[in-house]
Amino acid sequence: MSWTSTASLCCRLVRTTPVRRHAPRQTLCSAARSTDAVDREYADLNLRPLYPNVRPQSVLPPRLPPPSLLEIAYQPDRPPIGEPTEPPEWKEVFEDPLLPLMVDIGCGSGRFLVWLAKNSNERRNYLGLEIRQKLVERTQFWVTKLGLRNVYFMFANATVSFEQIVSSYPGPLSLVSILCPDPHFKKKHHKRRVLQTQLVDSITKNLCLGGRVLVQSDVLDVAADMRERFDGYSDVFEHVDCIDEDLRCDTEGWLLDNPMGIRTEREIHAELEGATIYRRMYQKTSCFSRLLH
């Protein structure tokens, strides 16, 4: 090939319009289905018009990509601090700070707690802890617009902040939920998972007698890890199926039904894709003497 022909070919290659890679049509349709399902589940909140310029961040990619990409999808923004977050002035954030408190650790977009605060028959306050500040700001905007005085969201790393925040609350801690937390798949990253010994101890110590802990994940390894941690406190907790016959389990001891009356967004998405949700709910039946010394 002559020099002229080679140069001409190079020019044509350089001028070639780059091909844009579009997501597979099936993936886009599945994402749209997932978004529609979330909107239907939370329709009575009518939140979308309250924050029209922010694209919802709650729906994860519909099909499981390779693990390395999935880990990236699950990674939250790192909090700027490793020190415990100061608790709020409870009388300023809740109308009645003596009501029983539910804490949702890693509350994400917050729709789950907002729905409970607006619709639940339980007289309690709701606190969401989340380390993605933009989600907290958006959700607190919704709370203000809806005029709710029984729910509040905080930008906090629950692993290090739970004890300082919850121990200052003047009412009883009646329910803690950890729902589909970030999996951190690689073994060397398991120490980044939210449910570490420090947090388990703090939940166990601060939960009132009769209080409950709900853990769930669509990743079996994560659910099994959380289950193992609370099963290790059998002198303090009983699984609810031993107490309430209406809460049924499968043969492996996982709760068959969602006990909260509303699904989280991740739960909606996962079930649309045919995934299994692994749940355990524990009830505190005695004091944890090892934490009292």
Image (cartoon, helix red, strand yellow):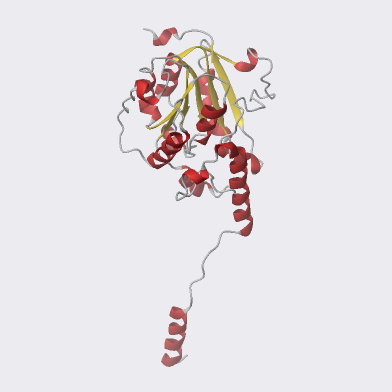
From where the camera sits, is residue 7 visible? Answer: yes
x and y, in percent, of residue 19 in the image: 51, 70
Rendered residue at 50%/7% (across/down): 286
Seen in the picture, residue 232 relative to 71 is either above or below; the reply is: above
Q: Is residue 251 above or below residue 139?
A: above
Left or right for 31, reference 103: right
Q: Nearer the viewer, residue 32 or 52?
A: 52
Side (left or right) of 41 relative to 193: right
Residue 282's spot in the image, x, y percent?
A: 56, 18
Snapshot quadrant of residue 253: top right
The quarter of the picture where the C terminus appears is top left
The front one of 165 and 145 is 145
Depth check, front residue: 28 or 139: 139
Residue drawn at x 68%, y 21% as measured from the top left: 248
Question: In the figure, is residue 2 to the left or right of 224?
Answer: left
Q: Residue at point 33% right, 23% down? A: 89
Relative depth, front residue between 248 and 107: 107
Q: Is residue 132 above or below residue 12?
A: above
